[in-house]
Amino acid sequence: MSTALLRELEQRARGAGFDLFGLVDAERFDAGQPHELRCARELPGCGTVIVLGCGGPSQAQWNLPRELADLLRKHGHPARLAEPMQSRLRFSALGEAAGLGTVSPVIHRLLHPQFGPRVMVGAAVLVAGRPFGPIADASIAERFQPCCHCARPCLSACPGGVHDGHGDVDEDRCSQERERGPCADACRVVRSCPVGAGQALPAEVEAERHRFESHRALAMRGRGLLPTIRRWLGI
């Protein structure tokens, strides 16, 4: 078991602004995903996923995830970088499986106990096998459910009303609101969430994460569950 290597990977990640770091058992994760959205589809034999996220005020160094994948390969472990703009993996679900928070059933964003929806799951490194040994289920979703007794100020905070309150988002309308200006640099939904309300981000970091989420949402169009639904229906 490569304990020293895992420690080095985490130290490098945190030093580059990825202060949220977690492991996911890929086989356990894939068991709950449609075939098209499984880790093993992107890396055959994938057994481990390293999930990299940002919660605090530091800006991420975006070359870091690729460096981690290169380091793993250098140590003889087949690895592949998965990024939200190219990969079809569900990164919020990966974040939840890694113990980085709970996916909100209201706005379908990852909520961290300390940072709320201000977190960003920036990348995942898929690794063949289990070089770090067995991976325990790190999910906190069963005990951290902040939306259950919340007044849901997020729904009224959105100027476009893009959230239906049941996890569905009108991405087209959301994109229009961002282009018109009221949500150009920050998300009113994120700002209104009482979870992590005391963790305001510097303006440049907030804008960076907002742009990231906006680009991710646009990139996901046509790459979500539609191919799976078509396969199920045989069309």
Image (tube, helix red, strand yellow):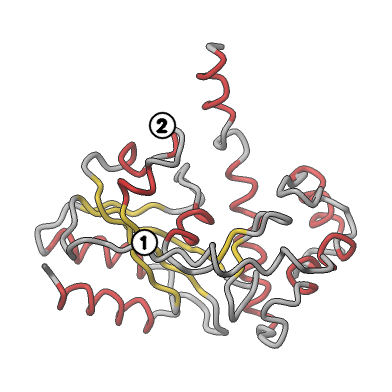
Q: Quadrant of the N terminus?
A: bottom left
Residue named by callout 2:
35
Residue 69 higher or lower than 233, as above or below: below
The amino acid marked with disc number 1 is Asp
Binning the other alpha carbons within 10 Å of mark 1 as few (below 14), some (14 to 19) or many (20 upward) gives: some
Give the residue drawn at x 82%, y 65%.
152
- Residue 21, quarter of the rendered image: bottom left
User: Residue 137 shows which numbered tag?
Assistant: 1
- Residue 202, quarter of the rendered image: bottom right
Q: Earlier in the sequence, mark 1 or mark 2?
A: 2
Left/right placement of residue 6 relative to residue 180 reads left
Where is residue 137? Give x, y as percent: 36, 61
- Residue 151, quarter of the rendered image: bottom right
Under circle 2, the secondary element is helix
Residue 228 higher or lower than 95, as above or below: above
Give the residue drawn at x 24%, y 39%.
44
Q: Quadrant of the C terminus?
A: top right
Judging depth in this view, the residue of 202 and 43 nearest the camera is 43
Give the residue drawn at x 65%, y 63%.
211
